[in-house]
Image: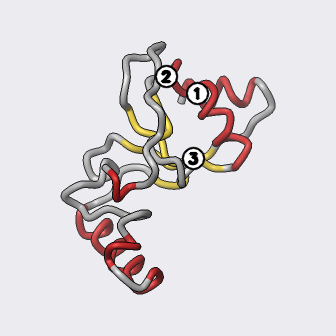
Amino acid sequence: QRAADDAEAEGILMVITSGWRSESYQQRLLDEAIVTYGSEEEARKWVLGPEESTHVFGEAVDIGYTDADYWMIERGSAYGLCQTYANEIWHFELMIVPGGSCPAPIEDASHR
């Protein structure tokens, strides 16, 4: 919430598009992605199963709008939130102590 408040003070509207997910919902997202991308291997670049997804563990958040994503990429470390995957500018995870340095994003979820 502090990040959203700070972004708003700079004229950036930030919304949470996804946060905690149940195991069954995460599985449904993976199943739908397999249909969309044609294989589990391709789908896992975008959606992990419930046993791996940090959304299921309450450690990930998806942010919208695009300007808020870029704001978080630049400033998220102040809140302990880091962009995890290079192909998902909206996905952030609690990875560090607030104020620390975020590691470089990995290519995609399949490289986790």
From the viewer's side, name the closer residue of 103 and 4: 103
- Mark 3: which amino acid? Ile
Evaluate whether residue 16 shows in this view: no
From the viewer's side, name the closer residue of 85 and 63: 85
Q: Which residue is drawn at 51% across and 23% down?
A: 77
Give the residue number, with chain letter if any, for mark 1.
3
| Mark 3 → mark 2, Cα distance in angstroms | 14 Å
Q: Looking at the rendering, which quadrant does residue 39 occupy?
A: bottom left
| Mark 3 → mark 1, Cα distance in angstroms | 11 Å
Q: Residue at x 73, y 42 (%)?
A: 67
- Mark 2: which amino acid? Tyr
Which residue in the rendered view is the most extreme toward the right?
A: 11
Q: Is residue 96 above or below residue 35?
A: above
Q: Badge 2: how crowded within 10 Å, few (<14), some, or many (20+)?
A: some
Give the residue number, with chain letter if any, for mark 2.
79
Of labels 2 and 1, earlier in sequence is: 1
Residue at disc 2, secondary structure:
helix
Residue at disc 3, secondary structure:
strand
Of labels 3 and 2, earlier in sequence is: 3
Residues at marks 2 and 1 touching, judged by CB atoms closer than 8 Å: yes
Of labels 3 and 1, earlier in sequence is: 1
Q: Badge 1: how crowded within 10 Å, few (<14), some, or many (20+)?
A: some
- Mark 1: which amino acid? Ala
Q: Residue at x 44, y 24 (%)?
A: 80
Give the residue number, with chain letter if any, for mark 3.
63
Which residue in the rendered view is the most extreme toward the left?
A: 51
From the viewer's side, name the closer residue of 70 and 15: 70
Residue at disc 1, secondary structure:
helix
Residue 59 placement (x, y as % from top left): 33, 40
